[in-house]
Image: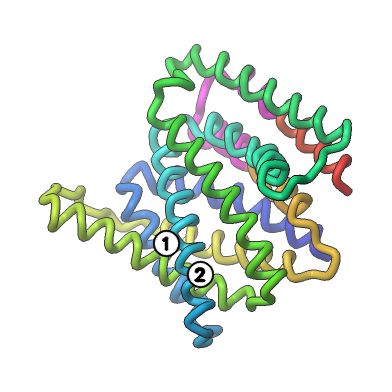
Amino acid sequence: MWLWMALASAVLLGLYDVAKKHALARNDVYYVLLGATLFTVLFLSPWVSAGTPRQHLMLAFKAVLVTVSWVSGMIGLKLLPITTVSTIKASRPMFVVLFSILLFGERLGLLQWAGVAVMLTALWLLSRSSEAEGISFRHNRGIWAMGLSVLAGVASALYDKHIVSGLQMEPLFVQFWCNVYIALLLGAVLAYKAFLRGARLPHPSWDWTIVLIAVLITCADALYFFSLREEGALLSVISMLRRASVVVTFVLGALLFRERKLRGKAVSLALLLAGMALLLYGTV
């Protein structure tokens, strides 16, 4: 059952990324994230529970990781073609594996090392094909933002396994309070920019896509957290299955936003998925 929940979560995540790209055409990154997060808190409010101070401290830390990942990812999404963003996000399982080696001393089998090699090759090819669009992997701000988003997302995924599966925190409890703390962090950033720095913030424009973003991420995360709670669930497998969302993002992004020069990125994405399959097959 946890496999199907992870796949359903992946589809919703793909739609979520497309909705974010649409909303960013009319609004600032922080407005879109704050609006969507507040609606998520509203949707989850019927399941609110108190929790202990230690649990809240742990969720506040998770909120920092998620906020860094979301904000940097939204900056990358605003500055880069969505097909480039989706391809970069497909590399996340590779970093989960590499961090598992560094932090937990895990050893990889031959197929897993082959998967890592294929994914590294795919990222190199993506950097070459992106140069045709004037995107430098070394100097482009959007690329660096996406790199930070992927790394913070990996840290959050590793932390999720600990608090949801290891400490047995209730998924909806985690979702609700984590989004509350994310909203507070985003509000603090906007307050700092507006009042302490005296920056002129762009005027927000209402967009129903923001509500859609909240619905999609609420459902996607709920399925993800409940899949982690299932007996026998493997974080490495769930993380890889969730990255299948990039296929939805890539195809819909190419169709809706009429992006060009897709052949090189499509090859890179196919190689990343092949590397993901090798990692998955070598893990289960």
Looking at the image, is mark 2 or mark 1 earlier in the sequence?
1
Residue holding disc 1? 36
Magenta part of the chain: 249-271
Q: Residue at x 64, y 35 (%)?
A: 91
Give coordinates of residue 135: x percent, y percent. 45, 19
Is residue 194 covered in magenta?
no
Does residue 247 show up? no
Q: Main secondary structure of the magenta part?
A: helix
Image side of residue 127 versus residue 165, left or right = left
Please tell me whether residue 135 is drawn above or below residue 248 in the rendered image. Answer: above
Q: Residue furthest left?
A: 198
Q: Nearer the viewer, residue 74 or 141?
A: 141
The amino acid on which the numbered mark 2 sits, given as a three-letter code, is Leu
Crowding around mark 1 (Cα neighbors within 10 Å: few <14, some 14 to 19, many 20+) is many
Secondary structure found at label 1: helix
Q: Which residue is located at x 79 percent, y 31 percent?
A: 115
**Which residue is disc 2 drawn over?**
59
| Residue 64 at least partly seen | yes
Instruction: Identify the residue at horizontal 73%, vertical 57% (top origin).
Output: 6
